[in-house]
Amino acid sequence: MKISKVEVGFVEAPLITPFKTALRTVHSIRNIAVLIYTDNGLIGIGEAAPTHVITGETLSSIRYAIEEVIAPSITGIEIDEIALLCQKIDACLYQNTSAKAAVEIALYDLWAKQYNAPLFKLLGGYKKNITTDITISVNETDEMVRDSIAAVKRGFSILKVKVGKNPVEDVERVMAIRKAVGPDITLRVDANQGWTAKEAVKIIGQLEDKGADIELVEQPVHYSDIKGMQYITNNTYTNILADESVFSPKQAIEVIEKRAADLINIKLMKTGGISKAQQINHIAEANGIACMIGCMLETKISVSAAAHFAAASKNVTMVDLDGPSLCSEDPIEGGPIFEGENIQMTDAPGIGLLIEAYLAK
């Protein structure tokens, strides 16, 4: 079964509410969709999110990378040669991780389809159900409290609270949310690189002293500030999660060796797809470091692939795959079943999406 054609289009979905972090505000999703056709009629689908403030990519750069660079390098190769295909994708571009991820997702979709098996089973098949958190965007405290209460009413027991735009108010925001949702809801805090190292230690220390009971703090400082991450990890009790600081296996090794974080957040848009995500996870697991699987602002296409990756691994103990839950419309049918915080894998082959129905729209 050989690759015969690669097509690039768009996938769009409006958000229920604006998505606000310390880095950006987004009102709707408009991502790249990739379709890979084979000579026996099967189609694989992937997605790339143009998160320019994190990966440096735009819709135009992703499209060009796929159509002009990646597609020519893989056309005509057998899907069975999945390792070779991933090597070629990685080698033909220096970075462009989201573009690489979209193509890899479509290839892994096809790879599993040719065996008529769901991808998570071929990757390891560890579990059929995973539990995701949901993001609470950074806003005024009262609005964040209302959003948190609404999320709990929707059935979410884990909230990922965005902070980092105003360090002076961040403790107030988190404590108000803790008071509103009670002690049984898990709170994760994500500063999105919004603090300095000293600010982070001060804020986390105050949250610890006030009994906020935070599960983790994600990427408190700039992605390049590994010394700052190390300082925070060494001077707080709360677990520190590295996100933007880890794109590659090499960066994962550096963070682990320097004890710059307690946990690592893997995102397919950062790693360039499933193959490098597996490498990072294996490195982390060998060093006793648990991983989270996260996502950018993505639709069900790439989030489904991330869910398959998570369901295949024992070491992925935390899930932040709330992209579909943030959308007011689902642009594609099939795939894992998203019901509130529960994501249930199915036995549909590949990543399970109904591509024909998507193409008919």
Image (cartoon, rainbow, N blue to C red):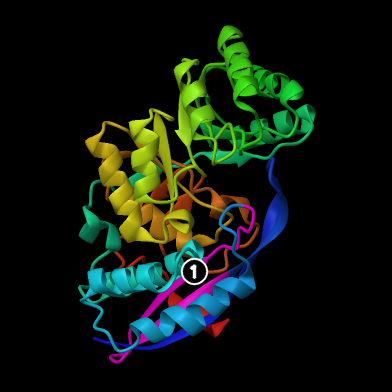
Could you tell me residue 344's position as x and y percent?
A: 37, 51
Q: Is 42 a magenta residue?
A: yes
Say if 264 sits above or below 168 in the image.
Answer: below
Please determine whether, in this image, residue 211 is positioned above or below residue 325: above
Residue 2 screen position, x and y as percent: 27, 87
- Image quarter hosting the N terminus: bottom left
Element carrying mark 1:
helix
For badge 1, the amino acid type reads: Ala
In the image, taking residue 332 as reference, residue 291 lies left or right, namely left
Nearer to me, 313 or 51? 51
Extreme-top residue of the structure: 209
Residue at the front extreme of this rendering: 227
Count of marks placed on residues: 1
Magenta region, residue range:
32-53
The residue under the point 75% across, 21% down is: 168
Judge whether 151 appears above or below 43 on screen: above
Left or right: 93 in relation to 85? right
The residue located at (64%, 53%) in the rendering is 53
Residue 357 appears in the figure: no
The part of the image, by quadrant, that contains residue 176 is top right
Residue 172 visible: yes
Mark 1 sits on what residue? 99
**Near-viewer residue (238 or 200):** 200
The picture places residue 195, in percent across and down from the top left corner, at: 65, 30
In front: 287, or 353?
287
Q: Alpha-carbon neighbours of circle 1 within 10 Å: few (<14), some, or many (≥20)?
A: many
Residue at 68% of width from left, 40% of height from top?
137
- Location of the C terminus by quadrant is bottom right
Examine the structure image and report whether residue 34 is included in the region drawn in magenta: yes
Counting from the top left corner in percent of width and height, residue 333 is at 48, 68
- Residue at the location (47% across, 54% down)? 270
Q: Quarter-wise, where is residue 153 in the image?
A: top right
